[in-house]
Image (cartoon, rainbow, N blue to C red):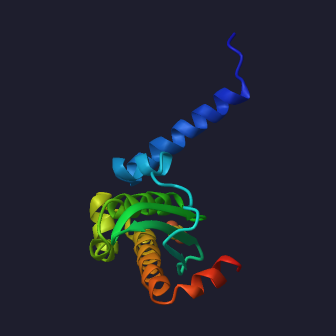
């Protein structure tokens, strides 16, 4: 008789969870939930935004910017699976683009590029878009008043 180990149980459970997620979410969402792109934080970023959504979850986005071009974008979130997918997509869309294009990365665009989210999860894409815009605004504020950045780093 085959021995049923704890590992087997968790592998089966995980497979079941992923299978159920595929019924609810697009392949792009499931892929980014399981393998989020750009997860992490940039040290000494040239733009940083942190937003808490109405659901109570938070997302932060940090940017490396050179000559008005977003060279790198990273995100962290304590939110749900779809916030991982939305943060991933927002930072993928931002990376390599110029700042003006970054401001155009809206909730609608993120939803469109993810092939949609269930209505009750659409606000997760808004959280990602708002965190990105907040990081871009922070970039401009730091450029205007660079001394404020020094204070922020000690917070
Ligand atoms: Fe809060 Fe998705 S970010 S439910």
Rendering quarter of residue 44: bottom right
The number of numbered badges drawn on the structure is 0
The structure residue drawn at horizontal position 48% and vertical position 72%, both measured from the top left corner, is 46
Q: Is residue 150 above or below residue 6?
A: below
The structure residue drawn at horizontal position 47% and vertical position 54%, both measured from the top left corner, is 38
Residue 22 x %, y %:
40, 46
Q: Is residue 87 above or below residue 136?
A: above
Relative depth, front residue between 75 and 10? 75
Rendering quarter of residue 11: top right
Whether residue 138 sits left or right of residue 41 in the image: it is: left
Which quadrant: the N terminus? top right
Whether residue 25 sits left or right of residue 109 in the image: it is: right
The structure residue drawn at horizontal position 45% and vertical position 83%, both measured from the top left corner, is 143
Q: Is residue 100 above or below residue 78?
A: below
Q: Is residue 76 above or below residue 148?
A: above
Residue 21 x %, y %:
45, 49
The structure residue drawn at horizontal position 37% and vertical position 65%, both measured from the top left corner, is 70
Relative depth, front residue between 58 and 71? 71
Which quadrant: the C terminus? bottom right
């Amino acid at each position: 008789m085959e021995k049923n180990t704890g590992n087997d149980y968790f592998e089966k459970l995980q497979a079941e969870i992923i299978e159920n997620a595929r019924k609810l979410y697009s392949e792009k969402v499931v892929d980014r939930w399981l393998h989020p792109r750009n997860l992490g934080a940039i040290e000494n970023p040239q733009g940083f935004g942190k937003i808490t959504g109405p659901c109570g979850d938070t997302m932060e986005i940090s940017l490396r910017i050179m000559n008005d071009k977003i060279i790198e974008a990273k995100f962290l979130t304590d939110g749900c699976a779809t916030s991982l997918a939305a943060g991933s997509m927002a930072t993928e869309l931002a990376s390599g683009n110029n700042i003006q294009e970054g401001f155009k990365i809206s909730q609608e665009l993120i939803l469109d590029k993810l092939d949609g989210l269930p209505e009750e999860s659409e606000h997760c894409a808004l959280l990602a878009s708002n965190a990105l815009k907040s990081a871009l605004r922070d970039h401009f504020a730091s450029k205007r008043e660079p001394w404020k950045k020094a204070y922020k780093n000690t917070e």
